Amino acid sequence: MIMTMNMIIIINIVLIGTMKKYKSVYFIGLALYIIFYVQMSPSSSNSYDASWIAAKENWGDSCKFTLVESIPENLTYPAGSPMLMSTYDAHLRLLSLVQESLYFSTFYWTLRGSDVEFHDNSSVQGENIYKLIYNIVKSGKVDVKIAQNNTNSDTDELASIGAQVRTLDFVKIMNAGVLHTKMWIVDQKHVYIGSSNLDWRSYTQTKETGVLIENCPSLGLDVSKIFEVYWYLGNKNILPSQWPSNLSTAVNSQSPAVITYNQTKNALIYISSSPQPFCPFGRTVDIDAIINVINSAKKYIYISVMEYVPIILYKSPQIYWPVIDDALRRAAFDRNVEVFLMASHWAHSEKDMYSFLRSLRDLHGTKDRTVNIEVKLFTVKPNTPIQSHIPYARVNHNKYMITDQHAYIGTSNWAGDYFVSTGGVGFVLEEAEEGGTLKGQLLQVFLRDWHSVYAANVF
């Protein structure tokens, strides 16, 4: 028996109302709530601790959500096309809000353009971001913590002037994988989650999508619990037998938080994480969040990801991993859900990706022509000789999905490794409306790209 999200919300409302009139009845009801909820809550390797329930009561924030993106230089759209706040402006905004703490969870840092043999003017925005971070650290007034995958010159210098830096050793922790998360947390109430690395290219040479979250302390606290997992592992480089109860959460796919955002919009929200061993009690595992979003779709599923490969790529020999692929095929074939998948074509595309994309596309028109699956490749070509020489640039780096029910913005490529052994997070929003909503805005951005000259049918 599975307790639905609506049942949980109703129980919360009844309990709160009962508490106001009859305290004794309230405590009886609370006891029943705990019993039922623990039985229905997501599975976890950690034992139950009642302290995590308190987190649910604090989610009444009125937050500001802004979709943000990076558009590579010389990639243009027709006049009137949907456009978002730039990632650069979003990161400037976050740095302007810092008062007490600034936490980064990052794959790598190359903000200063020193990783290339030539100077390119498009690194200016990254260099500006680095200078601002440097000055914040230098002031000594802000608690700056960086959880990262590898050491680098940027964070080495920041550490030398007072930043606290920890590097996660995934070989020791998981026997494979990397910390692939891209997450900023300011004062535990302002957050960025998205595809953008701490890399100058992420502002001007790669296409990125993320969400800027402002004035949202309950969500900020929940995201900070994920950071604390990284922070612990960066010190110990070994998984605990059980995560502390203060890192547990009451907010997940079965019990999302109710949030009012942008003054008038209401949505259900939760934050997912991967891999599973990094998830304290109550946290939805990232792959489970993705499958839940796919399985909940009734009309359409639109996906924009850099990489789509149903394989454990970095294991020898490679292993077939059809978890997402099977879910998409079932959605299209069994439920007649329209599936549009847009992957990226660039110099570093996994060679087997095209075969899997064609296989998915070949289902189109089956079942008496009722199955609708379309697959495209998005290409960001160099426009100048210098652009063609910038390594690991000119690519659609997105990792998001929109359905008629949800918006999902993640930090992971869609290959098995990223969910089995690699660190990543996902922002999951559920709302029925589309007009003027974050989900509706993300839909318009996807359709802009899908119908653009940069997207072509898979070859």
Image (tube, helix red, strand yellow):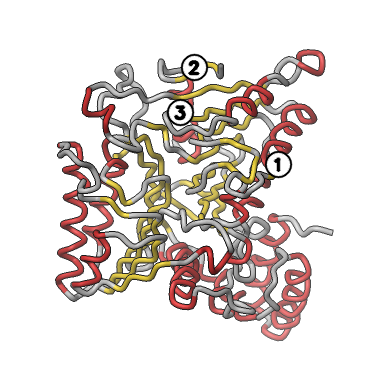
Of residues 83 and 240, the one drawn nearer to the viewer in this rendering = 240
**Horizontally, is 250 left or right of 44 in the view?**
left
Crowd class of label 2 (few under 14; some 14 to 19; many from 20; radius 10 Å) = some
Residue at 68%, 81% (x, y): give it.
22
Mark nearest the camera among 3 and 2 is: 2
Say which label, 3 or 1, has the lower sequence index. Answer: 1
| Amino acid type assigned to the residue bearing label 3 in the image | Gln
Q: Which residue is mark 2?
A: 456
Of residues 364 and 108, the one drawn nearer to the viewer in this rendering = 108
Q: Quadrant of the C terminus?
A: top right
Q: Is residue 456 above or below residue 208?
A: above
What kind of element bears circle 2? Answer: strand
Q: Which residue is mark 1?
A: 320
Q: Which residue is mark 3?
A: 444
What kind of element bears circle 3? Answer: helix
| Amino acid type assigned to the residue bearing label 2 in the image | Ala
